[in-house]
Image: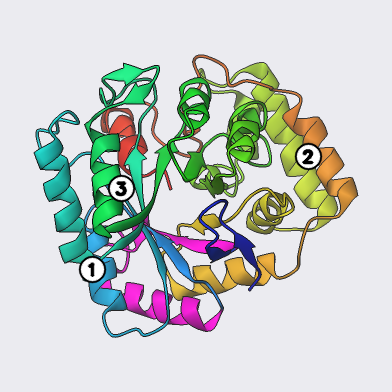
Amino acid sequence: METRRLGRTDLEISVLSIGGLYTSSLAGGEAETRRIMQRAIELGVNAIDTAPAYADSELTVGQAISGLEAPLIITTKLGGRPQPFDPQDIDALRASVDESLRLLGRDHIDILMVHEPDRPQQYPWWTSYDPLDGPALQLMDELKTAGKIRYNGLAGTTITEMTALVRSNRFDVVLAAFNYNVLFREARQTLIPAALENDMGIVLGSTMGQGFLTKRAEDEVRAQPFWLATARQEQLLGYYKLLDEAGMTAAEMCLRFVISDPDISTVPIGCKTVEHLEASVAAVEKGALPQDLINRLDELAAMVTHRPFEEPMILPLGKQYFGPGIANMGAAVQVGKL
């Protein structure tokens, strides 16, 4: 497995890593997570990203990696714990980190990220933007000095506010989700350039769009559900056509596209089973996409340069639009972005 430098941390991280949402009771629980982590190590994957918001992922991961001797880069986050959550309560934030260490069975966390510092201002993390300050930053400085964390970071889904936070140069790593994949390129405009200017490691989440880029829905797209803009409809149909012409699965195209960008440090994959992991590794080992396919994808991405206002963050193709399904969509977005 190829490794890449994780920005100024100088950690060498595998180009694929494990996204922790489904290394939890939301999928196969501790038994399957242990199988996933053991196989990941065998395949050269050396990192996992988890969070308090990912159900019981921290506990499940901690149980699964107990006794595994291979070095692992472990990322977890601040946000959502304890409830009711108050990002201005430094003592509660400190207790959350201690709980992460306990659940993971570690004496330190490699990368501690602020979870959802944007979208916009989902939580009031900051007491000042210029200069950037707040209890989370104060705690991260304290924890670095104490050796409880090695590096810090941001994990978010928007562009404008995330770019401003990155430009503060107070963070070592940025995790960008839902804004850079085969069809979405917003992060390439300002967020990734800002991260590169500050030599930050760049982690790219949700490169398959939580499934809407890999589950083909031609009939539904042609019928144009009420939330689907005409430009997005035409773009999706063009994407399906390109998959057919390339003779490639959507998952392979999604993964090989993002690893074609040498600025991306690692791509967390939300594998539910060992088989999902092995298929992802096999796709990545084929290497970067041919330039002609990248050019075609660039043309498709240019059809919709910014997401339409009415468009859900996770396109609900194949999902119920009304009733309990839509009511739960916000919770799914909050918990399941990686």
Q: Which residue sits at x=23%, y=74%?
A: 63
Q: For mark 2, give the secondary structure.
A: helix
Tell which of 291 and 173 is nearer to you.
173
Query: Which amino acid type is marked by label 3?
Result: Lys
Q: Position of residue 289 (x, y in %)?
A: 80, 55
| As drawn, 145 above or below 167 | below
Q: Any mark on residue 107, and which?
A: 1
Between tags 2 and 1, which lies in front?
Answer: 1
Quote the CA–CA distance across marks 2 and 3.
33 Å
The crowd level at tag 2 (other Cα within 10 Å; few <14, some 14-19, many 20+) is many
Q: Quadrant of residue 100?
A: bottom left
Q: Left or right of 216: which side holds 203? A: left
Q: Are marks 1 and 3 in contact (CB under 8 Å)?
A: no
Q: Which residue sits at x=56%, y=74%?
A: 278
Q: Left or right of 260: which side holds 19? A: left
Task: Give the extent of the magenta segment.
Answer: 15-43
Quote the CA–CA distance across marks 2 and 1.
44 Å
Q: For mark 3, give the secondary structure.
A: strand
